[in-house]
Image (cartoon, rainbow, N blue to C red):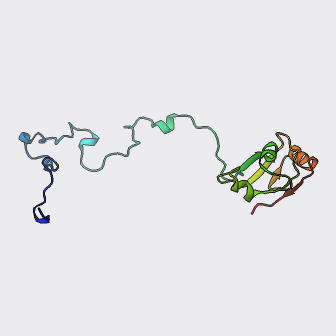
Amino acid sequence: MDLSNLQPPEGATTDKTRVGRGEGSGHGKTCGRGMKGQKARSGRDPHPRFEGGQTPIYRRLPKYGFNNPNKDRVAIFNVGRLDEIFDEGDDVDVETLRERDLVSGQFDAIKILGDGELQTALTVRVHRFSDTAREKIEDAGGSVEVIERG
């Protein structure tokens, strides 16, 4: 066996259907397009969303909500989790939070919220703090630094 006598297996190839070549072929007269109507005509079919003149579904369904492209995407993080993860005297910033997979995805700012208790003194540098979070960090002997976005 060599490349000169290769053939596809039996039944792998079929002849192209020749429509419009007589009634005996089974694809004569209307050529499988049915009788009359838009899809029986030559040329292009209507686009997939076209519903035959009926009011389309995207106009029948109610619209609601508003998508603001200019809003800030803020990743939130609670003070109580800082106590579980970081040791006394550690620096907590955007990079360390990302390295430890505590925040992920795309965001414009990180905000520390005040849920939970904090016993460890930490230096926290993020974009925003709630008042209770700022108070709890400072009460534990840590310091708070607000960094600018950039």
| Quadrant showing the C terminus | bottom right
How many labels, in total? 0
| Residue 46 in the image, given as x and y percentages of width and height | 35, 45
| Residue 85 in the image, given as x and y percentages of width and height | 77, 48
In the figure, is residue 27 to the left or right of 116? left
Q: Residue at x 65, y 43 (%)?
A: 66
| Residue 43 in the image, given as x and y percentages of width and height | 27, 50
Q: Residue furthest front?
A: 87
Q: Residue at x 72, y 52 (%)?
A: 72
Decide which of 62, 79 is in the foreground and name it: 79
In the figure, is residue 45 to the left or right of 120? left
In the figure, is residue 6 to the left or right of 69? left
| Residue 42 in the image, given as x and y percentages of width and height | 24, 48
In the figure, is residue 53 to the left or right of 110? left
Does residue 18 lie above or below 35 as drawn? Answer: below
Q: Residue furthest left?
A: 24
Decide which of 38, 28 is in the foreground and name it: 28
Decide which of 57, 89 is in the foreground and name it: 89
Residue 39: quarter of image: top left
Q: Residue at x 70, y 55 (%)?
A: 98
Residue 144: quarter of image: bottom right
